[in-house]
Image (cartoon, rainbow, N blue to C red):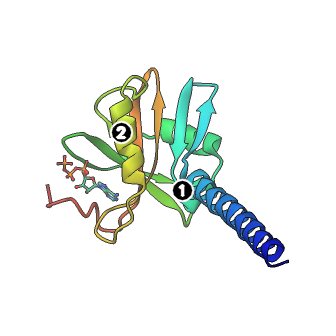
Amino acid sequence: MERALLLAFYITISCLAFVASKIVIALLLYKRCKKRPIVYDDGLSGGKMVMFRSPVLQSLTSDAFVKKALKLTNKDIIGSGGYGTVYKLAVNDTLSFAVKRLNWGSTEKDHGFKRELEAMGDIKHRNIVTLHGYYTAPRYNNLLIYELMPNGSPFSSGG
Ligand SMILES: Nc1ncnc2c1ncn2[C@@H]1O[C@H](COP(=O)(O)OP(=O)(O)OP(=O)(O)O)[C@@H](O)[C@H]1O
């Protein structure tokens, strides 16, 4: 009788451990999926827009955003640095982004660069401007999509 009880106890513990391990695995997979960037393929330009977990950018339709981004002109320029030109992209009256058009081309073959961008998309710090995503297309310069800082980039030293 005692042996039967002990056996039942072991079976119960094993079942509970099995269920708990499945829950932990499901939670880890869910967390990983949530962190994964959203990728939109733009059929028109053959480009790709990658949005990080930013709810701001994910609430926009990528088509509308890409169309606006590809229409940026000199009058939208808010600054320029060693790596490219920075434009203000206004989605509507209340929502704007800083879009940096890099001086070099597509990230398609540069996996290291992509990985670096995705790592930057994970960083959230009050002294570091948020990178919301990027756009890359075969015949177009790469675009980095940043949070728009009211007084310019926090990296900027005034030049
Ligand atoms: N997120 C942003 N919001 C508003 N303005 C920005 C933003 N990022 C950049 N700028 C503007 O664009 C300018 C150029 O920025 P950028 O980051 O390209 O170069 P930098 O920080 O000046 O220097 P470096 O070339 O070494 O990166 C900044 O000085 C700033 O005025």
Give coordinates of residue 58: x percent, y percent.
Answer: 60, 54
Question: For the residue marked with disc 1, what is the amino acid?
Answer: Arg
> Residue at coordinates 55% horizontally, 67% vertically from top-left?
94
Is residue 157 something one can see in this rendering? yes
> Residue at coordinates 40% horizontally, 26% vertically from top-left?
106
Residue assigned mark 2: 101
* Helix, strand or loop for disc 2: strand
Give coordinates of residue 41: x percent, y percent.
Answer: 61, 32
Look at the image and tell me in which quarter the N terminus lies: bottom right
Q: Residues within 10 Å of mark 2 (few under 14, many from 20)?
A: many
Residue assigned mark 1: 53
> Residue at coordinates 62% horizontally, 62% vertically from top-left?
24
* Helix, strand or loop for disc 1: loop
In the image, 30: left or right of 149?
Answer: right
Question: For the residue marked with disc 2, what is the amino acid?
Answer: Arg
Is residue 74 something one can see in this rendering? no
- Earlier residue among tags 2 and 1: 1
Give coordinates of residue 130: x percent, y percent.
Answer: 39, 60
> Residue at coordinates 62% horizontally, 25% vertically from top-left?
44
In the image, 93: left or right of 109?
Answer: right
Look at the image and tell me in which quarter the C terminus lies: bottom left
Give coordinates of residue 120: x percent, y percent.
Answer: 36, 52
Q: Mark 2 or mark 1, which is nearer to you?
A: 1
From this viewpoint, which residue is outermost toward the right?
A: 1
Q: Residues within 10 Å of mark 1 (few under 14, many from 20)?
A: some
157 w.r.t. 86: above or below: below
37 w.r.t. 114: above or below: below
In the image, 14: left or right of 109?
Answer: right
